[in-house]
Amino acid sequence: MSRRPAIVPAALSLGVLGLLATVATASTPAAAPVAQQAVISQPVAALAAVAAPTCSAPTLRPSTTKAADPTVRFAAQRGLDWLSEATVAWQDQHNCYGCHVQGVTVDALSVGHAKGYRVDERQLARVLAGVTDLPGGSRNPGGLSYHGGGLRLSSKSIGGAAFARFDAMVDHRLRDDLLTVAGELLEFQAQDGAVRDPEKWSNPPVGTGHPEQWTALAVTVWRQAYERSGDDRWLTAAATAEDWMAGRASKLTGAEDIQLVNYTLLGLLAGGAGAGESAVARVASVLEARQNEDGGWGLQGASDPLATGQTLTTLRQLGRTDADHAVARGTRWLVQHQLASGSWGTGGRGKAEAMWAVLGLVSVDVLTVEVAGIQHGQHVEGTVPVQVVAADNGGSGVRSVELFLDDVRVAAGCADRLNWTLSTANLPDGAHIVDVVATNADGESTRRRATVYAGDWYLTRPGTSWESSGTRVSVRNIAEQTKDTSIEVVIKAENSDDKLWSSTAPASQGAWSTVWSGEGAVPGQERYVAQLTLRDAAGKALHTIEERFVHAPAAQRQANYGAVAGRVNFADDEAEVANAVVELVDALGNVVESTRSTANGAYRFKDVAGGEYKVRVKKEGRATQEAPVMAAPAAESSADFDLE
């Protein structure tokens, strides 16, 4: 069976669509609390599966919706071909890693691969070798840098973001490079969450000189590092960075450098913010207001390829498609100004502009799929009508549209549109994945995905990590912004109800974190539980989750405890399984910890005491599977699953 359309995490900020796009969204909490295990382990009750549609040739018909101009994908392919050839030529001439040159090219080739464009695999392999093996590449002493020494942050953030998108959209051959650079970027993050360049490198238009650029790119790296590894320490880094970006968003006047505005929005989305969140809506409105009458965007007023391509990339990450008026106008501007060579300019600046222009165009997919009624990150209640409209961008017509809830096909038809009602009455509290798959007459498909939350579930993706001042505890709050809500954190020793320390702070929508210094810690005790509670203005608890952690430096934890990690795939098509319940069970049959698989099917239990365990995986519509593992200090045990 062929693989399903590519799904990649919405955590990626450049060249990747977020809201209900042809991507996977951020996964559910990295470590589900013990108090919630009975809830999140429930199957989706009374979910009626429907058969795959059998759509014969006579039922095919042209889409009744307006599709994208077929010349757009032709222009995108020309641009992609030019970019690939120009990058290889530059690399042959300079024989080194040039962060923006190969970085944006890998971005565009990765997106092109996921969107069904023609990618020259030989040229791709050469560009990847340039990022990894040539002087300044990731596999040289010092990692990504300018000839092994300078421009460390810019080199690592731009190259690392390229690793992230390739890892999500193509394959995981750069996984180790991604995880290495993710760790290297941590040294540049300040206490307030921002990522600042100690070298203060600025080289417009490539290097903006704004910390928003480096922070957004670093968050992209950390979020994909989490999706690939399941390690929640990347979530805390991303959360503090997102919180800083939200503060920057609140201060935008609209007169800023448009790249600063783009990177601010890209950073928020990379951190996991949904399109409906207030900070995101504010920055999006600034971008929309900056569009010129001719349809493009400009760095300094008049429309240019770099600003237009970058802004289109940002809006598509937000979830806008070719049916959006602003996106359609910007796309037309790029197509109209493309040169016969496939580029948009000459020289160094022209090449930089063309790279972003290609990235802005190559996001046009095989089919345009519009979904109304739900959006990524939304909290759903009652019954929610969902409308799907698909349009083929190549002219062959739409063959079918299918809708899946938690990987169960719940609606399908041989048409270009579909109406369905999401009923939350029988959904357990927590995250649920909605997938829409549209297929054209040539058998090509586009998939859009969103994660929505049902029931009393507002705190998502908890994580912990050690820093010099103690253990940082982070979480995302998806509840609508209201006055006087708060998040209370209570620290308890593991297997104890005694409160050792507590703190309460206002609960703004989005990322939130606090640091426990160890005040009140039990002498000789290393294992603790952080209990996080969202409370309304009257103090009523709206949602409580728990996160287990070891309060000790990373080196000490690694020496005293082990890890159990692995991947979950579907056996029938090798696709990665997101949002599966994964439990760590001790020798007595007790569930020690429970988590969910990430968008890339990864799971991880860290700080596991040595001994015999089982890993148990549950997924609606699939048989429960178990595998034995042996945990040992300073070691990682692995158990992978192929769900039948």
Image: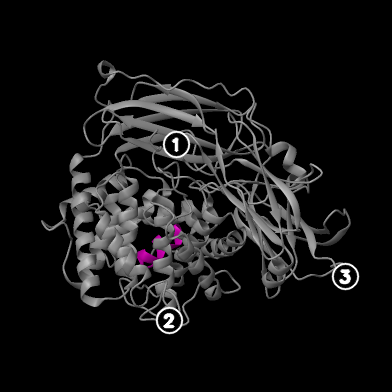
According to the picture, the residue beneath numbered tag 1 turns out to be 573
Disc 2 to disc 3, how far (Cα)? 44 Å
> Measured from the top left, where is residue 135 in percent x and y?
34, 78
The answer to whether residue 262 is magenta is yes
- Numbered circle sitting on residue 200: 2
Could you tell which of marks 2 and 3 lies nearer the N-terminus? 2
Rendered view: 180 above or below 630: below
Q: Residue at x 71, y 69 (%)?
A: 559
How many residues crowd around disc 1 within 10 Å: few (fewer than 14), some, or many (20 or more)?
few
Between disc 1 and disc 2, the foreground one is 1
Helix, strand or loop status at disc 1: loop
Query: Is 147 in front, or is 237?
Result: 147
Helix, strand or loop for the magenta stretch, by majority: helix
Who's the residue at 82% across and 44% down the image?
A: 588
Please report contact status of discs 1 and 2: CB closer than 8 Å, yes or no.
no
Q: Please state which of the two labelled residues, at mark 2 or mark 3, is closer to the viewer.
A: 3
Label 2, secondary structure: give it: loop
Q: Quadrant of the C terminus?
A: top right
Chain part drawn in magenta: 256-266
Residue 631 % position (x, y): 71, 56
Chain-order first, disc 1 or disc 2: 2
Image location (x, y in percent) of residue 33: 73, 48
Three-letter amino acid code at the position of disc 3: Pro
Nearer the observer: mark 1 or 3; the answer is: 1
Q: Is residue 380 left or right of residue 261?
A: right
Helix, strand or loop under label 3: loop
Q: Is residue 603 visible?
A: no
From the viewer's perspective, is 141 left or right of 635?
left
Tell me the amino acid under the disc marked 2. Lys
